[in-house]
Image (cartoon, rainbow, N blue to C red):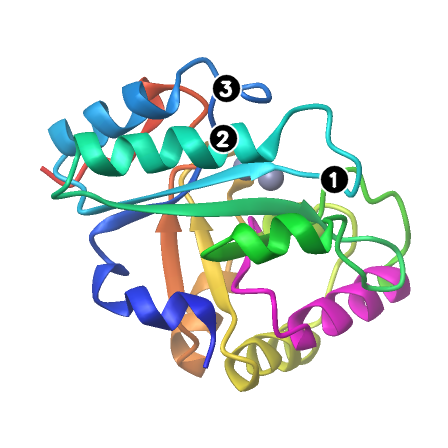
């Protein structure tokens, strides 16, 4: 069972990919939670950027999240992270951080390699039991063009490994035409996320 499945009931009523002022976002954990309630969300997942070596204290972020849980008891607040997919298929996060996370997003960020490297790295990432969500698939397709059959194989691999495919709401992460239709046709599970870096970008469901 994947970690995200414990929160499956919140899949359509949450925002599963949110950043804070710990890295490059504008707002604090508390400010994001306050806005999440105003926006009608029932779940918010703090998925801050991580690396194996961090230049901020993840434990302090976790303490902020614990404080927010007390202040917003009706909101489900998850600790997560967004880890970069590495060449060869590892993810750039330490075991210490992984242990603290309720959910883990794996994304391509600045992965300047060819199609073969992308596919190989993604396949290995999807098989990693720690990975819950494939973040903004658009950043893969931007750098390599896949045939329909190749896309289908990847979508099926997501399904086989119970990895959610992210529907990222940022316009710059719009996937190529046909991809989301194919996801739907194949029957893979998806999650809608804002990837918000400020309160103004949080998902709104009211
Ligand atoms: Zn990202
Ligand atoms: Zn992000």
| Residue 3 against residue 78 in the figure, above or below | below
**Image quarter (top left, top right, bottom left or bottom right) of the C terminus:** top left
| Residues rendered magenta in the picture | 116-136
Q: Quadrant of residue 169?
A: top left
**From this viewpoint, is residue 11 visible?**
yes
| Residue 146 against residue 143 in the figure, above or below | below
Q: Badge 1 local density, few (<14 within 10 Å), some, or many (20+)?
A: some
Instruction: Give me the disc on residue 61.
Output: 2
Q: CA distance from mark 1 to mark 3?
A: 16 Å
Q: Quadrant of residue 193?
A: top left
The residue shown at (68%, 72%) is: 128
Q: Badge 2 local density, few (<14 within 10 Å), some, or many (20+)?
A: some
Q: Of label 2 and label 1, which has the lower sequence position?
A: 1
Judging depth in this view, the residue of 94 and 122 nearest the camera is 94
Front label number (1 vs 3): 1
Residue 145 percent across, percent down from the top left: 75, 58
Residue 149 percent across, percent down from the top left: 66, 80
Find out whether residue 119 is within the magenta segment.
yes
The residue shown at (58%, 19%) is: 24
Judging depth in this view, the residue of 14 and 3 nearest the camera is 3
Q: CA distance from mark 2 to mark 1?
A: 15 Å
Q: Which residue is mark 3?
A: 25
Q: Which residue is mark 1?
A: 51
Q: Is residue 202 left or right of residue 190?
A: left
């Amino acid at each position: 069972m994947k970690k995200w499945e414990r929160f499956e009931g919140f899949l359509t009523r949450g925002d599963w990919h949110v950043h804070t002022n710990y890295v490059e976002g504008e707002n604090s954990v508390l400010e994001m939670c306050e806005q999440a309630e105003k926006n009608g969300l029932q779940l918010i997942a703090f998925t801050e950027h991580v690396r194996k070596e961090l230049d901020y204290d993840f434990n302090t972020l976790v303490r902020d999240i614990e404080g927010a849980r007390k202040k917003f008891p009706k909101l489900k607040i998850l600790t997560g992270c967004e880890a970069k997919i590495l060449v060869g298929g590892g993810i750039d996060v330490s075991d210490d951080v992984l242990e603290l996370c309720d959910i883990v997003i794996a994304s391509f960020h600045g992965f300047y390699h060819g199609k073969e490297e992308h596919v190989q790295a993604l396949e290995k990432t999807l098989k990693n039991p720690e990975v819950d969500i494939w973040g903004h698939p658009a950043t893969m397709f931007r750098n390599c063009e896949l045939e329909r059959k190749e896309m289908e194989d990847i979508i099926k691999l997501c399904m086989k490994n119970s990895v959610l495919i992210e529907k990222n709401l940022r316009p710059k992460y719009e996937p190529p035409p046909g991809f989301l239709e194919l996801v739907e046709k194949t029957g893979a599970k998806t999650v809608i996320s804002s990837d918000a870096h400020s309160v103004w970008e949080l998902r709104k469901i009211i």
